[in-house]
Amino acid sequence: MAGSTHLVTNQVPPLVGYDVFSADRALAAAVERHLEPELREEVLGELSALGRTSGSAQVQEWGAQANENPPRLRTHDRYGHRIDEVEFHPAWHRLLGKGVSAGLTAAWGRPAGHLRRAAAFVVWTQVEAGNGCPLSMTHAAVPALRADPDLAAEWEPRLTSMIYDRELRPAHLKAGALFGMAMTEKQGGSDVRANTTVARPLAEAGTYELTGHKWFCSAPMSDGFLVLAQAPEGLTCFLVPRVLPDGTRNVFRLQRLKDKLGNRSNASAEVEFDGTWARRVGEEGRGVRTIIEMVAATRLDCVLGSAGLMRQAVAQAVHHCTHREAFGGKLADKPLMRNVLADLAIESEAATTLALRLAAACDDGGEQERALLRIAVPAAKYWVTKRCPAVAVEAAECLGGNGYVEESGMPRLVRESPLNSIWEGAGNVQALDVLRALRREPGALDAYLREVGQARGADHRLDGAIKNLLTELADLGGVEGRARRLAERLALVLQGSLLVRFAPPEVADAFCAARLGGDGGAAFGTLPHTLDLASVVERARPEHDPAS
């Protein structure tokens, strides 16, 4: 009989078997705030069901399995025939199937579709962020395809379907389809106008033959792709189906899968087009304008995804410190650790509150809300995604050495955390896009100022931040060199105004003190000690019942 040297004590139970949605008080409150009363019961029930699924031990295990078993490229079958397929672990397909059935590609046309999908995306990201890529691309392809009514009528029902069909076959034979995207090339990167992929018109109107190489192709196992290429009249958007209507494979040469820092469960590829059949989307020479609606939607998903990663990191940190004892008491009750947890919590809540406000604006569709999105989406994408790595790393540190061990799940969050800042236009691209909105669309700034102005007079630190922002905007000399600073201030002031209006006083007070009033340090855990930090931490505790 084996001996035992000691009893294992003071170990934190795994954070499983809970409702990821309902336990997130900031997220649940944001959904309720923006919902019409007649939809409340339906939507909250739907999100709570997804929350229980996401928090289950089984689905959490699927996330770990998908991450630990990355996709594999199969260029040829056993007989030497070129097939260009990507093989995934069964857990990937289970996760993707759950995501599709939960409506993560079905926002368009549903009541409060963008809001309920945004909340679901925040929840589902916390299981395994990798499958968010095909879900995001498929969701975002819809507005781009609407540039061609015939294409939209053909493809939109498939893309918004809540049925996952993993088989590669003609799209018209499938109950649901997924979309990817291939824009960037080796020589250009974010400068897509430097693309060299060539589109040669074919005899049939609107059809082309593509020749070229894409450095990044997102979700290469999808049924169709939006692609940019140079047509006779300039850069143009195209739809490239993976399988042609007659059942033959389109020319879609997968050269290799990218070996990425994180996002390991998801495939990103280099793809070669060589006589690849494509259908034009929109007018020749207007490719960027055609695809810009897709880019805007995926950028908002970057904000949502980062909010989800931050929430999971904070939930794990607060959960650990609530159960772990050290130096004679619970870690969460120690003043310095409480300060760290509270600081992380307000960052997470600010991200969630902003992200859901933007999703609600997508549902509204009015001119004022569209103008707000034009400036707020790139500012939020810039700032929230930048904060995500800092939150993930600090939250992992709250677990001590345990947080550095793969079994804790924290290293996966840390590796994933920089991704949303890089994809869909890195920080400089977002900051410059903010400037573009300021210069070309005066209505965008008006909409922004009207939004933040709703909180004026409620907090002197917010009032001061708005005044300073107006001073910066009044002098646009040398503005490109300070575009990042401007994007940061726009995002922070918008977050502050939303928290002052909607968050509990202790959360808004802490945010305004540290983020707008200068009463906080460069690192987390430097909030003024006089604040009600215990209430902030309790609000972030994942076991807490939001109905209480």
Image: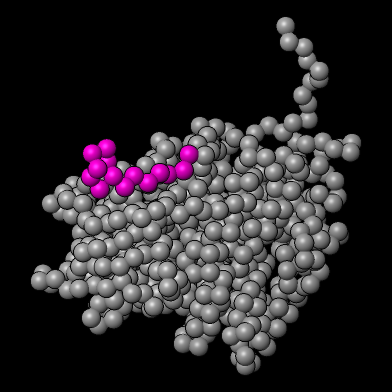
Asked if residue 501 shows in the view, the reply is no
**As drawn, 376 above or below 415:** below
- Residue 423: image x %, image y %? 49, 63
Q: Position of residue 440 (x, y in %)?
A: 46, 87
Residue 34 position, x and y percent, is 51, 60
| Position of residue 338 in the picture relative to residue 395 (left or right) | right
Quadrant in which the C terminus is drawn: top right
Q: Nearer the viewer, residue 406 or 450?
A: 406
In the image, taking residue 314 as reference, residue 156 lies left or right, namely left
For the point 45% across and 71% down, the residue is 189
Left or right of 172, for residue 218: right
Give the magenta range: 69-82
Name the one closer to the observer, 189 or 299: 189
Picture quadrant of residue 362: bottom left
Tell whether 325 sits left or right of 211.
right
Q: Which picture quadrant has residue 514?
A: bottom right
Q: Is residue 15 magenta?
A: no
Nearer-the-camera pick, 336 or 393: 393
